[in-house]
Image: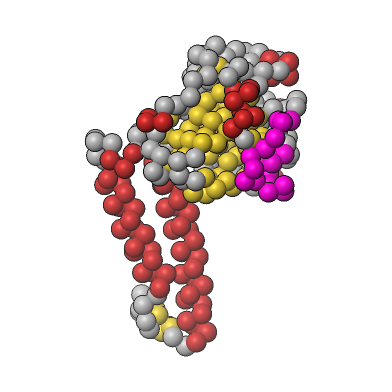
């Protein structure tokens, strides 16, 4: 006899349809300490000559050991620019080299491997951070206690100045991170951290800029129509018509495409030019 869909899957599907949110998944990556303990090497800083300080920033992520973390079945997922990189278990640290500028940090808690279902329990953090080239940052995650101090550049109302995920100063971080171990990629706890993600950061920037310019193009066309600077298409030829003068947004879109193509061409080189290091 054919069995029906399990109740928890029906509940999950209902939540997805009702919320209308983008759903993420972390199957094979989200095991907590109860399933996979962290046994990597003790903390070792990344040598200064092994990351591209002229255009990149280095961000360490760590989570102190605790009874809470040891009993977790699933660990929270960490995203940068809407891309998953690791799930942070207790007594662990890892790092990512990023392109300087505005980076989007998100932390989500998996529910049977799915994320993005809505609610404060699911979305632990959503924050934009301005990273400066050549700087080193430390993001501390803990559900049981707060750090001694936070990063001095953060305003009091910044999402990463309080809560479970806090950007802390170097002195606070070095007192704790030295007791953690590197978050190795393991079966049921796979991750893609401990590397440069500047290439993906740049692609994300191009995508966001393109979306913005397309919206600006629509607004520019509406303004031209209101001023009478837009020629309507003839009824017998639907492909005619258009603006009577060049659009500034179109010029910027073409310039953006040239910049993106030049970046992609440079990134194909094998000499490490511009500091790009790739890991698929």
The residue at the point 50 percent across, 65 percent down is 215
Task: Locate residue 29, reporting x and y percent.
Answer: 54, 23
Task: Locate residue 74, reporting x and y percent.
Answer: 64, 22
Taking depth in this image into account, of 184 and 45 the one nearest to the observer is 45
Give the main secondary structure of the magenta stretch: loop
The extreme bottom residue here reads 228
Q: Quadrant of residue 8?
A: top right
Q: Is residue 159 left or right of residue 47?
A: right
The residue at the point 33 percent across, 56 percent down is 259
The extreme front residue here reads 171
Part of the protein shown in magenta: 146-162
The residue at the point 46 percent across, 57 percent down is 209
Q: Is 46 located above or below residue 34 in the figure?
A: below
Q: Quadrant of residue 230?
A: bottom left
Task: Locate residue 125, reporting x and y percent.
Answer: 66, 39
Taking depth in this image into account, of 15 and 221 the one nearest to the observer is 221
Q: Quadrant of the N terminus?
A: top right
Please tell me whether residue 245 belongs to the stretch shown in magenta.
no
Q: Is 239 located above or below residue 262 in the figure?
A: below
Coloration mode: secondary structure
Residue 64 seen from this side:
yes
Task: Locate residue 67, reporting x and y percent.
Answer: 73, 15
Q: Is residue 9 left or right of residue 232?
A: right
Residue 72 seen from this side:
no
The residue at the point 31 percent across, 42 percent down is 274
Q: Quadrant of the C terminus?
A: top left
């Amino acid at each position: 006899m054919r069995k029906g869909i399990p109740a928890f899957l029906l509940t999950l599907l209902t939540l997805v349809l009702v919320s209308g949110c983008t759903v993420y998944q972390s199957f094979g990556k989200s095991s907590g300490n109860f399933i996979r303990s962290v046994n990597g090497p003790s903390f070792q800083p990344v040598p200064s000559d092994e990351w591209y300080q002229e255009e990149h920033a280095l961000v360490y992520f760590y989570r102190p050991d605790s009874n809470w973390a040891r009993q977790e079945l699933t660990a929270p997922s960490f995203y940068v620019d809407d891309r998953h990189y690791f799930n942070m278990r207790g007594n662990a640290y890892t790092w990512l080299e990023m392109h300087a500028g505005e980076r989007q940090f998100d932390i989500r808690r998996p529910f049977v491997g799915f994320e993005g279902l809505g609610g404060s329990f699911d979305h632990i953090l959503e924050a934009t951070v301005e990273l400066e080239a050549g700087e080193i940052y430390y993001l501390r995650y803990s559900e049981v206690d707060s750090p001694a101090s936070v990063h001095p550049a953060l305003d009091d109302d910044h999402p990463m100045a309080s809560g479970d995920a806090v950007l802390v100063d170097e002195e606070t971080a070095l007192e704790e991170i030295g007791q953690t171990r590197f978050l190795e990629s393991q079966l049921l706890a796979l991750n893609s951290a401990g590397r440069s993600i500047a290439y993906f950061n740049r692609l994300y920037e191009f995508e966001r800029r393109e979306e913005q310019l397309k919206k600006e193009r629509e607004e520019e066309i509406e303004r031209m129509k209101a001023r009478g600077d837009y020629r309507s298409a003839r009824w017998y030829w639907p492909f005619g018509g258009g603006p009577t003068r060049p659009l500034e947004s179109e010029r910027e879109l073409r310039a953006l495409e040239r910049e993106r193509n030049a970046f992609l061409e440079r990134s194909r080189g094998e000499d490490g030019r511009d500091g790009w290091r790739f890991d698929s």
